[in-house]
Image: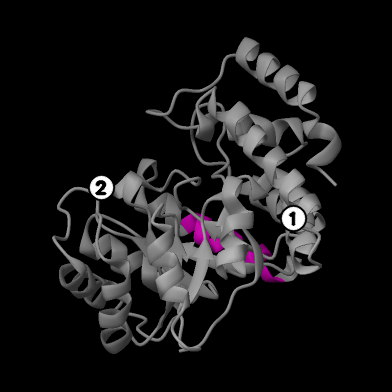
Amino acid sequence: MNMKLKGLTAAVHTPMHADFSVNESRVVDQAEHLARAGASGVFVTGTTGECHSLTTDERLKLFEAWGRVAHSNGLKFIAHVGHNNLPDARALVCAAAANGADAISAMAPTFFKPADAAALCDWFVQMLAGAPELPFYFYDIPAMTGVTINTREFVQRAAEQIPGLVGVKYTNPDREQLRAMLNTNGRAPDMLFGCDEELLEGLKIGCRGAVGSSYNFASPLYRKIIAAFDEGVTESAQRDQDRSAEMVRTIAKYGYNAAAKAVMGMVGIDCGPARPPLRGLSPENINDLKRELEAIGFFDWALG
């Protein structure tokens, strides 16, 4: 199967009420905001979306909510269906298909971990049985799953066993492996780059699509990086990439996932708090973060 996602896919936050219940009504505002900012798609209930802090029923309802608004806002809809148990994973796969997802993605199981590429492939074959033709991206994020495999070997195996395999959401620090996977004489899988603060490096290696959390609030900055790279204006691209890295470092000082949700509030899209065990920011923390972002010029160069 051949599918190529280009541009910026925002790994969207799961909006919460103050009591940590999911606020599905906010999805409309998120979609409209991302469309205005120039994002090309959404990646729903991934790491940024706090997938493993949500119940399966909550994730199913989020698929329904995004299924109603993504396409009408010109956004591709990628549903993250990764789970640690097979019945719930299969339910998520079927729900993604039923709600019009353009593709699905899944990280490896994180408790009983597959030992190697063959075992991971076997898991996905069983998991995807309800929609085997739906475009599928392996979500390679070893820092969070604790599963480090030979991704190139996995893709080679999966290409023979998973009809819907199209590529990898590559949140993996191994750049040499990424280069090798893209250098396959026109048969490269669709490699979606997953490190926002190093997007320019991903473009230089050969990625043309990216999935990231900071695209929720800084898509215009990253669109300038892509445009400058495409036009060969390397100094401009590097300047804006350096701004991205400083922005990410600033947010990460406060605990990235929860702080990124606070930034969404600063740009006018209130996604509420992060759900425990993530620690939320106090009002004082939020004010301090805003002052630091103002000091580096974030509100001047990140929002377009």
Residue 211 drawn above or below residue 270: below
Q: Amino acid at mark 2?
A: Gly
Please name the colour scheme applied to the rendered image.
one colour
Marks 1 and 2: which is nearer the front?
A: 1
Badge 2, how many Cα within 10 Å: few under 14, some, many 20+? few
Relative to 164, is 213 above or below? above
The residue shown at (44%, 81%) is 134
How many C-alpha atoms fall within 10 Å of the one at disc 1: few (<14), some, or many (≥20)? many
Q: Residue at x 29, y 49 (%)?
A: 145
In the structure shown, which secondary structural element does the residue marked by tag 2 occupy?
loop
Residue segment shown in magenta: 61-71
Residue 205 left/right relative to 108: right
Distance of mark 1 from mark 2, alpha carbons? 31 Å
Give the labeled residue for mark 1: 225
Q: Residue at x 47, y 88 (%)?
A: 185
Whether residue 85 is situated above or below residue 154 in the rendered picture: above
Q: Position of residue 85 (x, y in %)?
A: 22, 58
Q: Which mark is residue 146?
A: 2
The spot of residue 298 in percent (x, y) is 77, 33
Q: Is residue 119 left or right of residue 187?
A: left
Q: Does residue 133 lie above or below 34 as drawn?
A: below
In the figure, residue 159 lies in which quadrant?
bottom left
Is 28 displayed left or right of 97 in the figure? right
Dot 1 amino acid type: Ile
Residue 93 spot, x, y in % from top left:
38, 70
Task: Give the x, y percent position of residue 232.
Answer: 78, 65
Looking at this view, is 156 or 94 the one in front? 156
Please give left or right for residue 150 compared with residue 239 in the image: left
* Element on which disc 1 rests: helix
* Predominant secondary structure, magenta span: helix
